[in-house]
Amino acid sequence: MSKVRTRTRAQESTAAIERMYITMRHLFNRGFYKPMGVSGETLRNALLQLRPEIYGSVAEEKAELHGLVYILDRLPVGIEQCRYINLTSDEGYKNSSFEVIIPPKRRRNCYRIDDEQMNIEITRGRSDIYDILTHLTFMFIESNKIARRVFIEETGGVIRDWEKLEEAVQQKKLSQKDREIALSHTAGILGRTFEEVRAAHKVFATKEDPERFLSIVYWLGKIGMEELADGNKRTITFSPVLRERLGHHIHGEFWAQHIKKTLKSNGLLGRPLHIISANMHSVMNSIYAKGALGKTSRIKDDMEVFEKLSQPENESLREKVKTFAEKNGMISIPDHSGTNIDVQLFDTARIDFESLGWDTSLTDVDSGNMPVLFVMDYAFGEQAYETIDELLKPYTEKKEGKTYMNIASVSIMGKAGILEGAKGDLMIPNAHIFEGTADNYPFDNELCKEDFEGNGLEVFEGTMITVLGTSLQNKDILKFFHDSSWNVIGLEMEGAHYQKAVQSASRIRNSISKDVKVRYAYYASDNPLETGSTLASGGLGITGVKPTYLITKKILEQILIT
């Protein structure tokens, strides 16, 4: 008798991810589905089988509080109250009287149409849709948990804990005693301790809505119970315009064309262009902070200056640096394309590096050949391919024809999950593997491990995996990648997409030089293999300052000091 081979948890998890993405594409093409109905069953079951680290106890009876914080930071405020969620393209709502709602941790425009409907604008490609549907699936599972705990099917009534929570939510203002009474009943509903629930209440509380946590639990339970009792199911729809536009680079093309026009109008189109995907502060601060702040900073060490600039209360200092930069060679290009990717151009011919404390080798370079630094804000997943692919195409005008871009280098820095090490540690990849496909992208990285050693941070060199969504990763899959011969050191969402665009432009389309230099470096935002160190555990805070500026400095040194 042949031995029956059982699948490992890593294989089961991989299959669950594949089912989720196939299902999401099918539902998108269909145009609508009911998340808690038959059409949403495959998504729910796949997520429960996968049990991603970010979603903690999603497969257990008790509520998952950290996961709830994580997803609601990335979804519009009030979405838990809505029965109808409509995903749209940019269809003119920004010119309406509807108030735009932007989630704290995701740059997407959302609009509350009425008491029951929320519209979410998709301008960043399929990755945005996957992200939203994954978070909504988690939210509906948690909503159903609450509803089943409080709804008594035999009588059609509710448990006492629910009645007390409802009374508290209907009050305009709660005293400390009344709040703690309500939290005690909420703990019973959620299957969590009073201490855990009190901590969650503190996280969700805002000045405008101090009892937001109680309201969220109430509405999740209320809408969930209406589905159980009356069959009045929530519905997610995809607008016809969104289904027609998706995948056609409409926003990326508009974004790239506007940038190329700006380059030309400033006489920069033919100059060597160094593309840097980063945030909107590290390159600017690295070049100008000393000159802008001077002795007023009262801090000698560069890293202390950068830490000071990163603190929320120092907005006036950040504005001072920006104003100084815009007078000394920086051009700001706010986004109007819908990509939510702002851009900064740095004309090095207009920067007095000597007075800013930079020892460069550009002093003898002809001004017509001085490099231009092109800093773009972070893309999101597949949007990285859309934007860079469009940017690397020649600039075409009716009268003058094609003008090929003089791309000298492409540098990508950002946050990623690390599989060995701690928050803030560095990852220097030599290849990107695209999860769920046979695509892999090896490259010669201009950055190396030795560039960053001796700075008090651990540095890892190896392969990065570009995942379809960070919220879908679990320990079994990641442990397999880490322990296998793939030598995976971390995971992120854009690397393979960036490299795909660079390789197709340089080796297939011949729109840029084959000698274009690439640089990739990431710092760890989380370690999903460590319990309590996932993205749901909170942000980096000041820990992210040092690795951000170490990477920025090394990229700038390689560009400016040849």
Image (tube, helix red, strand yellow):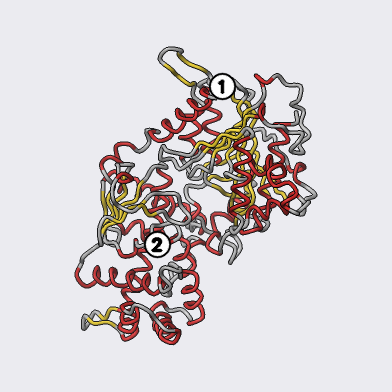
Relative to 321, residue 59 above or below:
below
The image quadrant that residue 430 belongs to is top right
User: Where does the image place residue 454, in percent across and percent down from the top left?
Assistant: 80, 49
Q: What residue type is labelled 1?
A: Gly
- The quadrant the C terminus occupies is top right
Relative to 204, residue 424 above or below:
above
Q: Can residue 70 be seen in this view?
A: yes
Relative to 338, residue 162 above or below:
below
Q: Nearer the viewer, residue 25 or 256?
A: 256
Residue 559 lies left or right of residue 131; in this view the side is right
Residue 94 lies left or right of residue 153; in this view the side is right
Q: Is residue 2 visible?
A: no
User: Where does the image place residue 39, in percent across and percent down from the top left?
Assistant: 27, 55
SS category of the residue bearing label 1 = loop
Question: Residue extending furthest front?
Answer: 296
User: Where does the image place residue 116, in percent across and percent down from the top left?
Assistant: 25, 61
Report the mark closest to the observer, 1 or 2. 1
User: Where does the image place residue 324, in percent across and percent down from the top left?
Assistant: 63, 40
SS category of the residue bearing label 2 = helix
Q: Mark 2 points at which residue?
A: 138
Residue 276 lies left or right of residue 421; in this view the side is left
Instruction: Say which mark, if any, is on residue 267.
Output: 1
Tell me the residue at 68%/39% (across/down): 287
Task: Tell whether label 2 touches label 1 (CB within 8 Å).
Answer: no
Q: Which of 356 and 561 is in front in this view?
A: 356
Tell me the residue at 56%/62% (across/down): 538
Tell me the residue at 62%/57% (across/down): 311
Residue 130 lies left or right of residue 28; in this view the side is right
Is tag 1's residue or tag 2's residue first in the polypeptide sequence? 2
Instruction: Say which mark, if any, is on residue 463.
Output: none
Q: Which amino acid does label 2 sit on?
A: Phe
